[in-house]
Amino acid sequence: MTIRLLGTGAADGIPGFYTANPVSRFALEVGGKEIRTRAAALIDGSLKIDLPPDTLAQMHRDRLNARDWSAILFTHSHEDHLAVSELQYALYPFTELEELPCTIYGNAVVLRTIRERYPDWPLELVEFQSFQPVARGDFRITPVEANHVPEEHCHNLIVEREGKAILYATDTGVWSSSSFAFLSGRRVDALVIECTEGFMPTDYAGHLDVETCIQVVQRLRKEGALAPDARVVTTHHASQGGARHCDLETALTKFGIEPGYDGMEVVI
């Protein structure tokens, strides 16, 4: 299995929209891995995770074709993950298609948002239920309850195929005891996990900083949720967190955690 990180930035990206903080200024100066578009991923070229406002630019950058997607998996309804207006460009009059050629999966809030925007469109929508796996071709997808916002069931996603498993955990916060219990002993082969707040933790419990990211990863290893050789990669970095990519390398690699970057591929 291969997961491509199309974007690894938080809601305003890096450089941050309208911000002039040190991380944003540094990113403008050096470019490369310091530039982060809004978080999204693609598994085996088929399963698209989230649809942020930067999706078109990401597709152009990596020379990808949205018609290759068999499904779009939404983690939650925040606009940096669900740019609902982008869905219209898949169908007539923007294309010759009269039906969306992929299935959309998401929680109740995500699906309601899409239905309200496109009440009469021929869309196949499937509601995620926490901890209940669904099959998509030869993929098995299991939504895990995140600790992000109380207004909806936000999800992290375990994607399995041919004996391999990837856990994509953006906008997760520190999981509840029920989510940790569900993950205990599952042995995923790769973990993509948020590190939104960097070196600047806040009172908001719905995101991880460097310290809590390390703690969560260590707990998953201790409880057997990660295979011994599992790769751990970060995503969803905010410029306000004060962490440049080079700073994250210094802080995280000694704990066996790789700072993710836009365009990075993880193969398991």
Image (tube, rainbow, N blue to C red):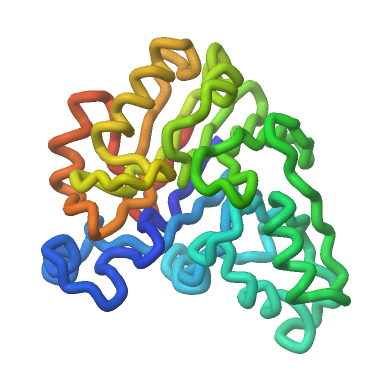
Total marks drawn? 0
For image coordinates 42% across by 22% down, the residue present is 230
Whether residue 190 is visible to the viewer of this picture, yes or no, is yes
For image coordinates 22% across by 33% down, the residue present is 252
Camera-nearest residue between 2 and 165: 165
Is 4 left or right of 87, judged from the image as shown? Answer: left
For image coordinates 65% across by 37% down, the residue present is 143
Whether residue 70 is visible to the viewer of this picture, yes or no, is no
Is 237 left or right of 78, judged from the image as shown? Answer: left
For image coordinates 13% across by 37% down, the residue present is 250
**Where residue 46 sits: x, y (%)?**
65, 50
**Where residue 3 sits: x, y (%)?**
50, 43
**Where residue 206 sits: x, y (%)?**
43, 44
In the rendered image of this protein, does residue 62 appear above or below residue 171?
below
Q: Quadrant of residue 98?
A: bottom right
Q: Quadrant of residue 239?
A: bottom left
Q: Which image quadrant: the N terminus? A: top right
Camera-nearest residue between 268 and 145: 145
